[in-house]
Amino acid sequence: MAEALRGIHLHVEKGEIVALIGRNGAGKTTLLKAITGLVKARQGDIHYNGERLNDKPAHAIMRLGIGHVPQGRQVFGDQTVEENLILGAYTRIKQQPKQVKEWLEREYTRFPRLKERAKQQAGTLSGGEQQMLALSRALMSDPEFLVLDEPSMGLSPLYVKLILDTVTQLRQEGKTILLVEQLAMAALSIADRGYVLSSGTVEMTGKAEELLHDEKVVQTYLGA
């Protein structure tokens, strides 16, 4: 089995947006999957609020307050928009049915287009609408910590702005966010700090503003 990550040391403080940038194959998606329990780390420790996550299944990690928006959106295409959203709250709906209804209305307020499409099959939505749905589905578990994997992938500039503006708003609402993004300049422009991954290791780290002006980062990752 190939080793995707090695010697990674990364931390995210409460209330931060931390951007994770790097070329394709650098290990960014694998790192997010390790945090959310979708792949198992063979070595090292992953902690959230002092609790070790390594041996916990994905649904238990979700219950701890971690939400995951996967690469490629991965909505349930044969389910309606509303059914997708309710599925996002499956760990909460039995214990907190009233809150789940409130969270559903909150997401319809956040993205009115989803309310308009509530009874429409998710597979018939545009790419931008599916990304809104994927983000709102993750928020339906009311997470404190949100990991986002390439939320701008395949979107028009209008939808890219909408999604990144929403990420900024979520930070203002008190969410903590780890953002993987190929649009490195856009990610660093809204982040507090950043990490640059290369071949499964952390190559650079620093304040987002400093990375935006670092000559190596600019030449390698920002298209200059």
Image (cartoon, helix red, strand yellow):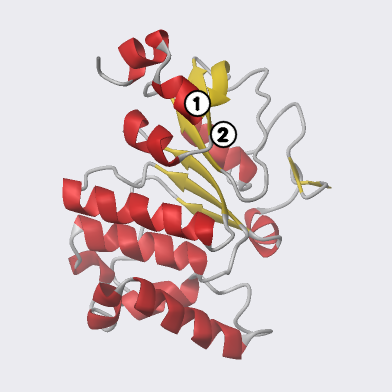
Q: Which quarter of the picture shows residue 34?
A: top right
Q: Where 2 falls versus 58 (above or below)?
A: above
Evaluate if marks 1 and 2 touch, with contact meaning CB atoms under 8 Å apart.
yes
Q: Residue at x 25, y 18 (%)?
A: 223
Q: Residues within 10 Å of mark 2 (few under 14, many from 20)?
A: many
Q: Is residue 27 among the parts visible in the rendering?
A: yes
Vertical side of 50 occupied by 121: above or below:
below
Q: Amino acid at mark 2?
A: Leu
Quadrant housing residue 84? bottom left
- Name the residue carrying label 2: 31
Nearer to the camera, 182 or 77: 182
- According to the picture, the residue beneath numbered tag 1 turns out to be 27
- Residue 175 image position (x, y, % from top left): 57, 57
Horizontal side of residue 30 vs 50, given as left or right: left
The three-letter amino acid code for the residue at tag 1 is Gly
Q: Is residue 87 above or below residue 37?
A: below
Against 126, is 147 above or below? above
Which residue sits at x=23%, y=54%?
159
Nearer the observer, 140 or 171:
171
Q: Does 3 sit left or right of 221 as displayed?
A: right
Label 2 residue SS: helix
* Number of marks in picture: 2
- Residue at 68 percent across and 55 percent down: it is 61
Q: Is there any visible trace of residue 156 in the rendered image?
A: no
Query: Which residue is at the far bottom?
Result: 98
Position of the N terminus, as image quadrant, is top right
Question: In x, y percent, where is residue 32?
Answer: 55, 40
Residue 44 point in image, percent of width and height: 76, 28
| Cα–Cα gap, marks 1 and 2 | 6 Å
Q: Nearer the viewer, residue 132 or 162?
A: 162
